[in-house]
Each structure stands twice: as C-alpha cells, then as structure tokens.
Amino acid sequence: MNNALKTAGLLAAMWGLTVLIGWGIARGTGSMFWLYLSIAVGLGMNLYTYWNSDKLALRSMGAVPVSREEAPQLHAMVSELAARAGQPEPRLFISPSPTPNAFATGRNPQNAAVCYTQGILQLLDERELRAVLGHELMHVYNRDILTSTIAAGMASIITSLAQFAFFFGGRDREGGNPIAALLMVFVAPFAATLLQMGISRTREFDADHDGAELAADPLALASALRKLERGNTMAPLNPTPARETTAAMMIANPFRGSGVRNLFSTHPPMEERIARLERMAGY
C-alpha cells in the first residue's frame, strides 16, 4: 500500500509539472492550442508503444517463442505460479542473449509475455528461475507495464512542452523572464526523469515483494539477484535505442555502469533489494 501511494504521488507530481508548463505556454502565447496538440501527439505515441509493447520489446532482444515440448520445466513453473495467482498464463519466450536477465511485457495479463535470456538459464538453478518468474509475473499482474508507459509518456510530454515553452513562450505578453524559460527547458525534463525513475524503482520493489510472496521463496529471489548483479557486470548487454527501453523492464540493470549512470538507473540498488527480501525471510 505504501508503494502504491508513492507511485500515485509521483504520477500526480508529473501531472502537476505538466499543468505548470502548460500554464506557462498559455501565458506566453495567449493560446492553449499548441499545448493541447503536443499533449495529444505525446499521448498518441505512447498509446501506440503501450499497445505494441510486447512486440517491440521481444523484437529488440531477438526473442523467439518456446513451446511446452521445448521447455517443459519452464512451462510447468509458469502454469503453477499463474494458477497460484489466479491469473492467465503468459506466453514464454527465450532470447539468445548471453546477458543473464529476464523481463515481462504486454499490455495486460491476457496479452502478456515473459522472456528469459540464454544467459539467465545457464546462470540460475531451477529454484532461482522460479523466483525470478514470480517477480516478472507480478509486474504483469500489478499492471506495471501500464504504469511505466504512463510515466514515460508524461516524461516525454513534459520534455516536449518545456522545449516548446522556451522557443515560443519564453517571453509572455507581459514581458516574461527569459532566464526562467531557459531554466524550464532544462529543469523540467530533469525533474520528469527523476519522477519517472522514482516510479520505476518503486514498482521494482513491489514486484520483488509480491513475486517473493507468489513463489513463497524470498531467499531464492535474493540469491538470483546476487548472481544477476555479478552476471550483468561480467557480460553486459550491448546498448541500442530499442534495448534502452526494454532494459527498464528487466529484473536487473543489463548495462555496465558506475557513478552517475548508476545514480540515474531505473533499477533500485541491488543491495537494498536483497536486504528487503532477506528481511521478508526473517533474516
């Protein structure tokens, strides 16, 4: 409940920032038309991404569907955990990537997919893979794909509006402050990024907690996260624009990074995630 309230608060802050920029544009141009147009375009683009999120993410990783005959153990895990949750079974995919990771995608539980990489199948044991599956299933069942899409959409709209405000609304009809407009074009997108990261990190904590409860094995998920932290450091994913988007869905940050890059990661610190899971198990 605490994480749900935090997510709602962060989304409300993003909406508030959008309204503030919109007010600045209306004041500077004397018209709300361009504000409405930019919001409509931004929402349209993100609606398309949300509706096709599974295809885009799976294509970026070269993932292929795997049948029950090809991977009976994985399908048995999916069937068991989906039944425990009382939810539909997602489709199962495998990516040839050697980077150990997994992600879930799809606009709702009826159109969901879970993807394992070859790297994670070679790194984790069956108990750990089951715990990872619990985490990914809860992303789907908690509607996190929708939440992250809204957050990404709001961030892109805020960035576009800030740029529009600078170029067309920087000086309002009462002789507005151009320095304030310059600050807006940089500060607003930065603030939107921080809010988006806060939402993403909160949803990861929720998926860890709910997934560990679903699999009834928090220590297995903690063990998997430890291995994944080392595995992704040793064999990071080669970043591309499409993979940068998919990376936010993965259970562990697939890119090698330190310092500033880790500071702006969409994933919370692995040590904190592991500590929370160990506390769930009474450690």
Image (spheres, rainbow, N blue to C red):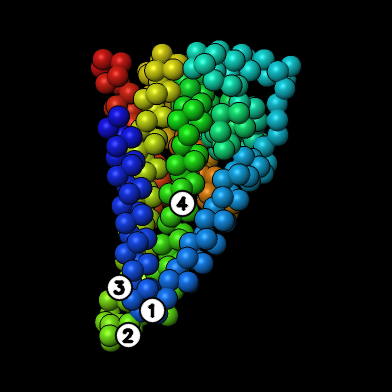
Residue type beneath disc 1? Gly
Distance from the alpha carbon under mark 1 to that under mark 4: 28 Å
Can you identify the residue that label 3 sits on? 183
Residue 73 falls left or right of residue 140 = right
Distance from the alpha carbon under mark 1 to that under mark 2: 8 Å
Q: Residue 272's spot in the image, x, y percent?
A: 30, 33
Distance from the alpha carbon under mark 4 to that under mark 2: 32 Å
Q: Residue 159's spot in the image, x, y percent?
A: 42, 64
Quadrant holding the C terminus: top left
Disc 1 and disc 2 in contact, CB within 8 angstroms: yes
Can you identify the residue that label 2 sits on? 173
Could you tell me which secondary element the residue under label 2 belongs to? loop
Disc 1 and disc 4 in contact, CB within 8 angstroms: no
Query: Would residue 75 be visible to someone looking at this image?
Result: yes
Closer to the N terminus: mark 1 or mark 3?
1
Can you identify the residue that label 1 sits on? 30
Disc 4 and disc 2 in contact, CB within 8 angstroms: no
Residue 137 falls left or right of residue 226 = right
- Residue at x-position 66% and y-position 42%: 55
Distance from the alpha carbon under mark 3 to that under mark 4: 22 Å
Closer to the N terminus: mark 2 or mark 3?
2
Between marks 2 and 3 in the image, the one whose residue lies nearer the viewer: 2
Q: Residue 50's spot in the image, x, y percent?
A: 56, 45
Crowding at dot 1, Cα within 10 Å, few <14 / some 14-19 / many 20+, comes out as: few
Crowding at dot 3, Cα within 10 Å, few <14 / some 14-19 / many 20+, comes out as: few
Residue type beneath disc 2? Arg
- Residue at x-position 35% and y-position 54%: 14
